[in-house]
Amino acid sequence: SRLERELDTGNHEEVRAAALILGRIGRDSTRRELRRVLFGDRGDRSRPPVQHLAMALGLLGDADDELPLLQLLRATKREEDRRGILMALGRLGGSASIEVLKDLWRHEKGRVFRASMLLAAGRIRHPEALSIIRLGLSDTKEIVRRAATLALADLRDVEHFNDLRRRLSDTDEDVVRHALIGCALVRHPKMASVLRSKLRDGDESIRALTVTALGAQGDAESLELLLARAAPRGERHERVLAALAFALARYADQGADEALRRLLSLPHPDVVRAGLLASLGRVQASTLVLPEVIKRERNDEVRRCALEMLAFRSATVFRELARTALERGEDKKSILALMQELLEILDKEPVVSHAILAARLQVMIDELGGSPEWNLLAA
């Protein structure tokens, strides 16, 4: 293809752009071309940007590329290119790279290159990777500790929970943030008790990451902490409230549904948008407040988000409302009125495609057939 031909043009910008695209959409012929350009005997070590070519091969390559990349790493002098090769080795995840990384650690003292080595070790996820990562965790340079903490997070192994917990008290706030990302990638029975104090941190980004980590746990203690933060007298900062919406959406619990509905009623556009997106799979949490959001909201983006959500999910929404009306006879009139209101909103708003609505409702009709829910909808 034209993009593959650009990998060997000699123009650095063209090569970089082509490599970035092909790393995502490449095929077998792309892999062969990358190998030819990177590993072929060109007699010129200043070849086009090895950094981006190597990263593309890291995405498209396989175990056969590990040893040639290690040889290329030894032969390459330019640090940006060497960092790209390290990223590729991390992507490939081969065990042979670990011994090379250990040897490099003894000789390479540059903090940025060491940080790249640590990130590669985390991606490789080999048992021996932890020995390198722990060297980075005790480093005096903040950038190295940050990379080591991210590498530890990348291992996604609950056995390293204590290493993550110790990073939560690091003097560098970025290290703490990276440790919280790691906490969000593993589940541990003591996670809620460890993170409780971070919910009161003065930095809203740390509180938001703490909320995200608690959302990933799925246990009762974590949910209790989240519900307390989502209460009217709990969290006030919009960024954290938005994170709360996504965290609560991961719990199949009535209390979480009620808290999510309260977040959807707040006068903060970013929080409402997050709540709408978070509740995509939670019909009960969003259906009853969608008309209210649409009528109340002055922010065009949020209103459009709510309208499109209602249109695309119309079949699910109306079916769930019909089921609820059948189960709760005393609320039948109010639910039917709500359904009528939703239809009127969809009919009036130009942002909603009638073709989408008709197709979705037809799917619902076909699925329900002559069921009680459909009879109620038809009425």
Image (tube, rainbow, N blue to C red):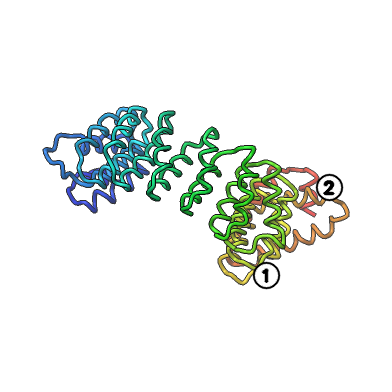
- Tell me which numbered mark, 1 or 2, is placed earlier along the sequence: 1
**Relative image position of residue 155 (x, y in whole percent):** 47, 36
Q: Please identify the quarter of the rendering in which residue 77 is found.
A: top left
**Relative image position of residue 137 (x, y in whole percent):** 43, 42
**Relative image position of residue 12 (x, y in whole percent):** 21, 51
For marks 1 and 2, give the one nearer the viewer. Answer: 1
Q: Quadrant of the N terminus?
A: top left
* Residue 65 against residue 322 in the figure, above or below: above
Which of the two residues, 172 or 297, is positioned nearer the viewer here? 172
Residue 296's disc is: 1
Q: Is residue 356 among what the camera can see?
A: no
Distance, label 1 to label 2, CA atoms, is 29 Å
Residue lying at the far right in this picture: please name it. Answer: 330
Residue 327's disc is: 2
Q: Please identify the quarter of the rendering in which residue 271 is found.
A: bottom right
- The answer to whether 331 appears left or right of 274 in the picture is right
Give the residue drawn at x 59%, y 52%: 198
Tell me if mark 2 has few (under 14), some (14-19) or many (20+) residues whose alpha carbon lies within 10 angstroms of its own.
Answer: few
Q: Please identify the quarter of the rendering in which residue 298 is found.
A: bottom right
* Residue 304 against residue 362 in the figure, above or below: below
Residue lying at the far bottom in this picture: please name it. Answer: 298
Give the residue drawn at x 53%, y 48%: 169
- Find numbered disc 2 in the image and state the secondary structure of the residue it sits on: helix
- Find numbered disc 1 in the image and state the secondary structure of the residue it sits on: helix
